[in-house]
Amino acid sequence: MSKYHLLIVDDDPLILESLKIQLPSNWKVTGQNSPTIPRSDQPFDAALVDLQLGGDPHHFAGLDVIEKLNQKLPQIEIIAFSGTIERSLMEEALQKGAKLFLTKPVHPNSLRSILSKIEELLELKNNSKLRFLAQSPHAQNLHREIALLKDEPGPILIEGESGSGKEVVAKLLHQQRSVTPWITVNVASIPDNLFESEFFGHLRGSFTGAEFNKIGLCEAAHNGDLFLDEIEALGLSAQAKLLRFLESGEIRKVGSKEEFKVNCRVLIATNQSLEKMCQQGQFRNDLWWRISGKRIKLLPLRERPSDILIFANYFLKSDPLRTKVLDAEAQGLLKEYPWPGNIRQLRRVCEQLLLHAPLPIIRQCDLLPILKDTPLNSGSHPAYLSPPLEVNASGGLSELVNHFEGQTIHRCLQQHQNIDQTARVLKISRSSLYKKIKDHHIQWRGT
């Protein structure tokens, strides 16, 4: 049974029949040989429109069809096609509402690939789970970007602040392929001296402590996806080794002289500006060029305010035993708040509201105590970054600075209860924060 509905507008009956034969079986086709938009009891999901309807070389009636379709069915995916290749014509088709432009004759594989990506876009839009259940233009563009990357080889770079949903995007990209395995690793948790062993594996006896042969992460992800989170924490030496793998697809286990191919797509996430890190000499330019060809950039929650209440209401309905709603003042406060921890922080706030708000209606007074510890604007400074009131300089400046650093990190951890957010506020990487926690002997049991 057909799942999707495609409208083809072309006045050449041979082309209409030819295109119908080429289409996948899950697409129902309605052919139209005039500029009139047909009525249908089933809404069209996509349209393929010939621009040169009527045979007049000076009038492109297909542009009018695209404009009418876009006005009547704003959600439809419109593909324009024509044997005339003129930049002004192609740009006008896009302005009228077309999403893509194909040249005649249309290659069957090109059309099937485009329809496959449209199918993915429709599935994302109709997904009933949270994912990116949002209405902002950014969210809609995000759906399209994810769909366009269906079946695309890696690497794919996902950029965004901590808590903005990078891993969710990576999982959506993986689910498009219907392949296994799915291997995920936080790069910040792997010391540089263990990078080769963890990523490429090792042979027994190759170094002290190598008691068994080990399969590396790349080999474990063979025929699937390998997701590398917080790539900014990778040292320069390890970056060179990762670049070689991305270029060749070959790995060599520690202690082995043989190389072999691994077929895995690499998805990469970062919460830092890798371009700035390149300028500062902290990230290799050649690795940046290699991974930046296919990018998805997530905006922080504060820059997509129309999504805040949608996410909040979803989280507040996630517990059927404690369903609560926000009053108008609480909604206003949520939209004004900058959300430095993004969606992850919003979820934790909603969990606390479900637990502590005494009424079924959440008021501003219920919300304020939970939000009070974080400044409401990016220009203010948290209290824990203020100098201590009493200064004992008897140990010298070095000891004083070291003491203040430890005290600041400890207070910041207590304030945020989250490693990612603390590292972001202090403007250091997760790996650096973990090292400082160890150096200062800070007792930490948070996340």
Image (cartoon, helix red, strand yellow):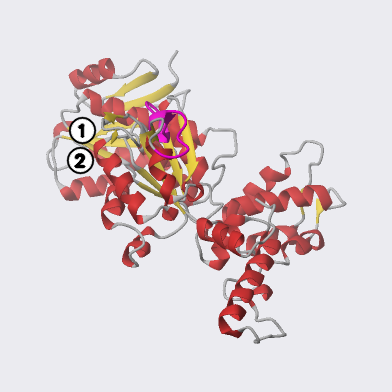
Amino acid type at mark 2 = Phe
Residue at 57% over, 66% down: 425
Q: Are the two marked residues, 2 and 1, in contact with CB atoms closer than 8 angstroms?
A: yes
Between 103 and 139, the one lying in front of the other is: 139
Q: Is residue 46 above or below residue 246?
A: above
Q: Which mark is residue 53?
A: 1
Dividing the picture into quarters, in which one does residue 106 lie? Answer: top left
Residue 247 placement (x, y as % from top left): 25, 41
Secondary structure, mark 2, is: loop
Q: Is residue 47 above or below residue 189?
A: above
The answer to whether 370 appears left or right of 440 in the picture is: right
Residue 220 placement (x, y as % from top left): 42, 29
Between 118 and 392, the one lying in front of the other is: 392
Q: Is disc 2 surrounded by few (<14), some (14 to 19) or many (20+) residues within 10 Å?
A: some
Amino acid type at mark 1 = Leu
Residue 113 placement (x, y as % from top left): 30, 28
Residue at 24% over, 49% down: 91
Q: Which residues are magenta?
A: 207-225
Tell whether position 371 is magenta: no
Tell whether position 211 is magenta: yes
Residue at 27% over, 27% down: 111
Between 216 and 283, the one lying in front of the other is: 216
Mark 2 or 1 closer to N-term? 1
